[in-house]
Image (cartoon, rainbow, N blue to C red):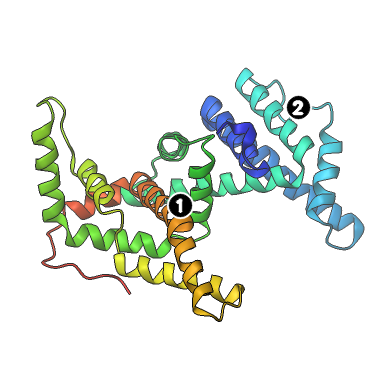
Amino acid sequence: MSAEELPLEMRIDVQIRDVLIRHRTTAWAIMEQDILDGIKRQMWCCSQECGYDVSETTALSEWLYAMYGRCLRPEPSEAEAESERAFMRLLREYQLTALKVMADRADDLNKHLWYESEAAGRDIGREAALDDWIKKYTWYLGNRELMEIEYAYKRGEFSRDEQDLYEFIRTRKQEIEECRKSWQGKLRPERQISLLDATKLLFFEKKTVNPRRDIELQREDIQREIERQQAIDEDTRTRIVLDYKQRVAPCWRDRKVKAIEYIITIHKDKVLKLLNESPQPEYSTVA
């Protein structure tokens, strides 16, 4: 699916990430310091002048009007000028929607800088943080399904699946190692199968990290559909169950598999750390 077929918020997101990829920390600084902070200052000034809190819409309109025909920075470099033009075009065209996505991305970048610095025990700097963020969060741009999974993950939709994944890894390390050896034996010697690869391969084979929870969730889906249709007789209930099994369940499973693969990919450092810990003797699902 092309970027043009994505929902509006995701199309804006793709363009913002593209600017960040091309112009790196320059674009990050323009977006955060010149645009987002500038609009916050505009909101404060307008509120002071009016004697009441003005809306974000009003502040954005006033800021865009004040900046019309002007550069955000005096004598900007080529990267600064291109970043500014791209961001300003998005703001003029999409207004608050673009502003919200920019604020979300700036927040993501600052959180990533903090998390990675904490993990390293030092301030890794904006350049290194952005490099790592780009590697983890831009490889699927334009893929609607994966971008929707990212948005759902940020909303907390897969929080229990993430914990189940970590429990799956902790308690199935021997299976993961056996999977690695099995696949290694099928490939040429120069093609090495890592433990991370083996974790994905074992998961793809099982297609679940907590079968009990998956069954419970699907039963809840079916029950909600029965209640929605006010199905009383047995024939209608049976039809709903069969329809779910044939039409909904495969898509449900496919989305869940992609979500777990997404979590493994963006949290590969944590996954590798778990894989290198001492194994636990038996598997227990997270309630």
Q: Secondary structure at mark 2?
A: loop
Quick one: 236 or 230, which is closer to the camera?
Answer: 236
Q: Residue 165 at what x, y percent from top left?
A: 30, 58
Left or right, 121 with respect to 254, comes to left
Q: Label 2: few (<14), some or many (≥20) within 10 Å?
A: few
Q: Residue at x 14, y 43 (%)?
A: 180
Earlier sequence position, callout 1 versus callout 2: 2
Mark 2 is on which residue type?
Cys
Q: Where does the image place residue 22, in percent across and percent down from the top left?
A: 54, 25
Q: Nearer the viewer, mark 1 or mark 2?
A: 1
Locate residue 122, reporting x and y percent.
Answer: 35, 46
Camera sees residue 229: yes
Residue that sits furthest to the top in the current view: 78
Residues 2 and 163: in front is 2
Q: Residue furthest bottom?
A: 232
Q: Could you tell me which residue is drawn at 55 percent across and 26 percent down? A: 23
Marks 1 and 2 sit apart, C-alpha to C-alpha, by: 48 Å
Residue 245, compared with residue 98, is above or below; it is below
In the depicted structure, whether residue 16 falls above or below residue 206: above
Identify which residue is drawn at 18% across, 67% down. Answer: 283
Q: Which residue is mark 2?
A: 71
Q: Which residue is mark 1?
A: 251
The C terminus appears in which quarter of the rendering? bottom left
Please, what secondary structure does the residue beneath circle 1 have? helix
- Binning the other alpha carbons within 10 Å of mark 1 as few (below 14), some (14 to 19) or many (20 upward) gives few
